[in-house]
Image (cartoon, rainbow, N blue to C red):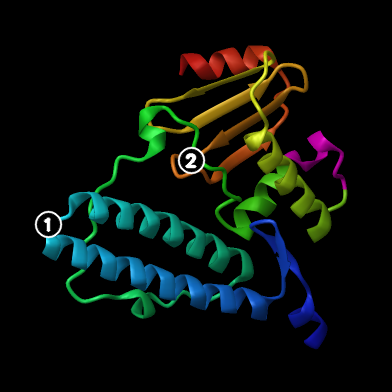
Amino acid sequence: MKAASLRKTEFDGKEMTNYEASQVQRRLEREIRRQKNRSVIAVSAGDDEMRREAQMKINQLTGKYKDLSDKFGLKTKAERMQVSDYRPVKIITPIQKGVKPESRPFESVKKLHKHFLKHGSDFGFFDDNDENMRLYEKLALEFANKEKKDTIDEFFNKNGFFFRYDSSTNDFLTMKPNGIIETYFKPKDGLKYWEKQKEI
C-alpha cells in the first residue's frame, strides 16, 4: 500500500505522487474560487472584459482540475469551488476561431488505456504496462505540439475537433475542442485515410 502511494505519475510535465496531486487539486480549487469571485466583482462593476478574462481562466483551471482528478483517481469536490452569486458566461474559445488549442492529455486513464491497447503497437509498444502507456501519451502530446512543417497537414471539422497528420511519419491525431487528445495512431491506409477524413 505504501509503495503504491509513493508511485509517481507524470502530469503537466511533472512527476508527482497521489498525495502531491491532491495538494495541486486543493490549489486549483482555491484558484477557481478566486477567479469566480473576480467574475462576481466584474459583474457588479459592469466590467465585461474582466468578467470574460476571469471566465477564460475558470474554464482552463476547471479543465486542468478534471484532467488531474481523472488521472490520479481523485474525488472532485464541487462544493469547494462554489461561490455565491457566480454565474458562468459563454466564451468564444480560440478553437472556434480556427486556432489550435493547447493540447491536453487523454480524458481519463481508462480512455488512454483503451487507445494504447488498440494503437500502442503502431509506435513500438507491445507490452501492456503503465510505463509504455505513459510514453504513448507523451508521444501523442509531442506530436500535437510539434511545429508545423511541409509534411504536416491539419484542419478543424464542423464540430470544432482538430485533426493533424504527418505524411512523413504516418502519424494521425485528433483533439477535442478543449484540446484533450481523442486518439493517436498510424492509419493503415496512410494518406488515403487522411484525405477521407477531410471529406467527412
Circle 2 packing at 10 Å, graded few (<14), some (14-19), many (20+), is: many
Does the segment drawn in magenta span residue 125? yes
Q: Which residue is mark 2?
A: 176
Mark 2 element type: loop
Q: Name the residue nearer the viewer: 94 or 43.
A: 43
Q: Which residue is mark 1?
A: 46
Residue 111 appears anywhere in the view:
yes
Q: Residue furthest bottom?
A: 2
> What are the residue bounds of the magenta stretch?
119-126
**Residue type, numbered disc 1:** Gly
> Which of pointers 1 and 2 indicates the residue nearer the eye?
1
**Residue type, numbered disc 2:** Lys
Instruction: Name the image quarter holding residue 173.
Output: top right
Q: Name the residue nearer the viewer: 151 or 54.
A: 54
Percent position of residue 11, x then y: 66, 60
- Residue pictured at 60% horizontal, 50% vertical: 106
Does the segment drawn in magenta span residue 87? no
First in residue order: circle 1 vs circle 2? 1
Disc number at residue 23?
none
